[in-house]
Amino acid sequence: MNRSITLLLLVIQLVLCRALAQSAAIQRIDPTNWWVGLKNPNLQLLVYGPKAGSMTYTINYPGVKLVKTQKAENPDFIFLDLLISATAKPGTFRIVGKSGSETVSRAYELKPRTTGPKGQGVSAADFIYLIMPDRFANGDPANDAFPDLLDTKADRSVPHLRHGGDLQGITNHLDYLQELGVTALWMTPVLANDETLKQEAPDRMQAGYHGYHFTDHYQIDKRFGGTEGYRKLGQALHQRGMKLVQDAVYNHVSDDHWLYKNQPFKDWFNQWPTYTGSSHKEQALYDPYSSASDRKVLLDGWFTPFLPDLNLRNSFLSTYLIQHAIWCTELFALDAWRVDTYKYNDLNFLNRCNQALLTEYPKLHIFGEAWVGNPVAQAFFVKNRIEQPFKSNQPGGLDFVLYDAFNAALKENFGWDSGVNRVYQALATDAVYADPQKLVTFLDNHDTDRYLSVIGDDYAKYKMGVTWLLTTRGIPSWYYGTEVLMKNTKNPSDAEVRRDFPGGFPGDPANKFTDAGRNEKEKDAFNFVKKLANYRKNTPTLHAGKLMQFIPQNGTYVYFRYDASKTVMIATNSTEQEINLETGRFAERMAGFTKARNVLTDEVINSLTTLKLPAKTAVVLELAR
């Protein structure tokens, strides 16, 4: 009898569960909220839930008009086009759906615009510091791992697993960043990466500790501290007069993204009969002789088998991503965007997205990652002076051309086209860009071998490259830990160049955030960067002045930053011997000046006719009359 009753109850439970599964419901709406007072009055809501696409919807709220409903191929989705008038007030209204006797509804909030600094942009006056949050500092060990996530592991002894760094850890060390001279913070993505571990190669696993495998656009990863932790970090930065840069990924998502598991349309992603990876050959975009098939493989091919490639030509998807960018900028008071894998995205989408952001936030800066090897390729993806059918509207970009030149100059012996000639020649092509000052310069980042390892652990060369970075044109950016001589290469995995910052985690044997925790060489490196970065910050000539460079000779490279108020001379001796540099050929910029102050040593030089330059040294001289 008891067994029969138990079976009956199970049957009833199954029937009820099935009935409930068939009931219409609204489980989520993206964007999760919106604002009144934006310049674009249009808003498209993605509504998701069982049978959501079969309902007829109404909205009753002053100043908000439901203009159009558009069904998706998946019956669990529908898109609602709203018009939000200038008279709409902040408040909450209900989105009501009906189908026969069924009625569903969900509250939706229109917020007032956020107050305080946002959309300020970054410029050549800034010094951007790049952090991978999981690897910088653990401010809250309670959020290291969660049992309800697909990846429940956190283990610092395993390179590809989560290590526990978070937003609170970064907030705790803002004093350190400001002491160094940092004015803007760029982090690898903080959006939710709730995914299973992936077998990237036979000997290597891949996980989303770096943040580039999105699984939900409208959640900040709770292992970093969630939405509130991110907002608090942004507020703390702005209270200090610092800026916040967010990392965007439009090209792909994780195969654990909820919209990959529940696709609104078959063409939400770029599909192939069999797996097809991107060619990574951006030449197909600007080559006047390229084929359509080559362009398709570059743009529609997948980055990896577990990163589905988004079809940015789908109008619903493109609107979804553009609105998400505005949502983040407004909610988190962002000042700039770095765009990942820029060259793999549909070009028209990129221009639409950039324009939508700049319409709402005219001072916002956008700099994409187009890892290319020549100035024409780099210029193609930013505002440029080249006559081509496609014209990018991206204000800036990561300067891989100058990055290559910096590293080549420090690794090669001087020659006709080698050594410091590399830097000279890279800058000599700046005429292809509409504004080269908006390019973001760097010595290394989370995708490259670390700078000190690239240049053979040569500390003299380290100082030369740092000097160039912080005195030439553009917006300098810095990879966490390079100031305390963190080094390594990507062999055997990318995690080797993403090691934990020493002192950011409980139990670390040394704390490099403090002077006492650094060895003598690390102290010298930190203080060298600190002095030069703060000098740059306090010297408008270095971020707004003109640049004049002279053709390198005999291993020397000389350039000037100058304006009406100041002239700064940067002179490099890249050779292995001390030299006496005759300054007569620089009279165009040095005429009238009789002495100088060495910015790095504070030494006063009373005669400028000849400058003594030690081997492998770059000097920064503030000229005086």
Image: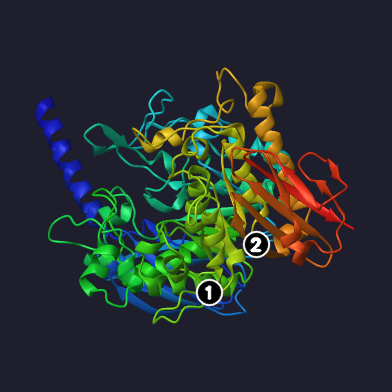
Q: Residue at x 61, y 67 (%)?
A: 90
Of the 4 image quadrants, the one containing the N terminus is top left
Q: Position of residue 540 (x, y in %)?
A: 77, 59
Residue beneath the point at 20% across and 41% down: 13
Q: Mark 1 belongs to which amino acid?
A: Tyr
- The quadrant the C terminus occupies is bottom right
How many marks on residues? 2
Find numbered disc 2 in the image and state the secondary structure of the residue it sits on: strand
Where does residue 311 sit, x and y in percent of width and height?
Answer: 30, 66
Q: Earlier in the sequence, mark 2 or mark 1?
A: 1
Residue 399 against residue 616 in the figure, above or below? below
The relative height of residue 276 versus residue 382 in the rendered view (above or below) is: above
Residue 476: mark in rendering: none
Can residue 184 be seen in the rendering of this structure? no
Say whether marks 2 and 1 touch (CB < 8 Å).
no
Q: Is residue 52 left or right of residue 385?
A: left
Q: Nearer the viewer, residue 187 or 429?
A: 429
Colouring of the image: rainbow
Residue 459 in view: yes
Question: Would you name the residue on which mark 2 appears?
Answer: 549
**Could you tell me the amino acid type at mark 2?**
Gln
Tell me the residue at 79%/39% (across/down): 601
Q: Which residue is mark 1?
A: 61
Examine the image and state in which quarter residue 579 appears: top right
Q: 230 and 503: which one is in front?
A: 503
Residue 538 place in picture, x, y as percent: 78, 52
Question: What is the C-alpha distance between the residues marked 2 and 1?
Answer: 62 Å
Residue 280 appears in which quarter of the rendering? bottom left
Nearest to the observer: residue 326 or residue 517: 517
Residues packed near mark 1 inside 10 Å, few (<14), some (14 to 19) or many (20 plus): some
